[in-house]
Amino acid sequence: MCQKLNKLLVLICLCLSLEIQADNRLAPGFAALERNQPKTAARSWQTLAEQGVAEAQNALALLYQQGLGVPKDLAKAHQLLTDASAQGLSIAKYNLGLTYYDGIGVEIDFGKAITLFLDAANDEIAGAQYMLGIIFFMGQGTEPAMDDALHWLNLAARQNYPEAQLMLAQLYLTVASGEVRLKQAHIWGTIAYENGMEEALAVTHYTHGALTKGQISTAEHVIEGCRENIATCNNQDD
């Protein structure tokens, strides 16, 4: 879907896919985006948003953030995300968390971002799990906690979130994770590269030279299992 759109619109379509699955009333707006008609999408979602449909509020907020089909209005976007989050919509909590994390229309507030990301992450929003991995690794608004960072990154990686897979590979390659774990680095680096993370090639290039042929063979066996069922990828090595 969304093949005809530019890169930015494709990203928005991907962000909205969870909402379409949850509420078919958003489908006409989604179809309008496919036709590269964001104004039509905005009108469709505006009506639903005014009726209090949380998925539409979240979708419309993304358009206001980017100025697609509507004038760019970060304050309006923030209010829509706040309204959708108040109704318990997990993806809206994630998106609202991003506004506090990046300072999009509001002051940066890592504490609020963490609270929102935790709620969304516990509802299996992979992007929120990834952001918590970054936050706990960096110690943003909290003390650095590598065990927590690895926990959340692993959860996101097993939802096939490429950025989390790459970060895991990079962390396992360094003592930042507590010890160098070359096999795990090789596994997640390979999966991340196959998912379009070209930076992961540097990880696997190193691990190919550092691991024995037997270790590589064992890792490749695990990788085959990951390709079949990413949700259980690397569990035996935790």
Image: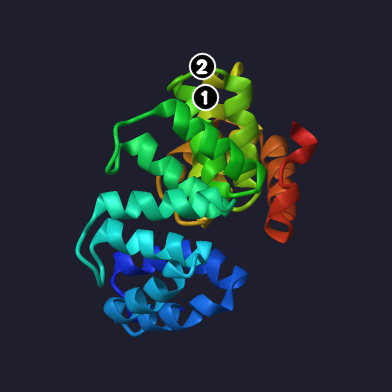
Can you tell which quarter of the image residue 108 is in? top left
For the point 46% across and 53% down, the residue is: 83
The percent coordinates of residue 103 (x first, y second) are 30, 37
* SS under mark 1: helix
Above or below, 61 relative to 1: above
Answer few, some or many: residues within 10 Å of disc 1's Cα (few below 14, many 20 plus, some between 14 and 19).
many
Q: CA distance from mark 1 to mark 2?
A: 5 Å
Quadrant of the rendering where the C terminus is positioned: top right
On screen, residue 88 versus residue 57, left or right, reads right
Above or below, 64 relative to 211: below
Amino acid at dot 2: Pro
The percent coordinates of residue 119 (x first, y second) are 60, 40
For the point 35% across and 49% down, the residue is: 78
Answer few, some or many: residues within 10 Å of disc 2's Cα (few below 14, many 20 plus, some between 14 and 19).
some
Residue 144 circle label: 2
Residue wearing tag 1: 136
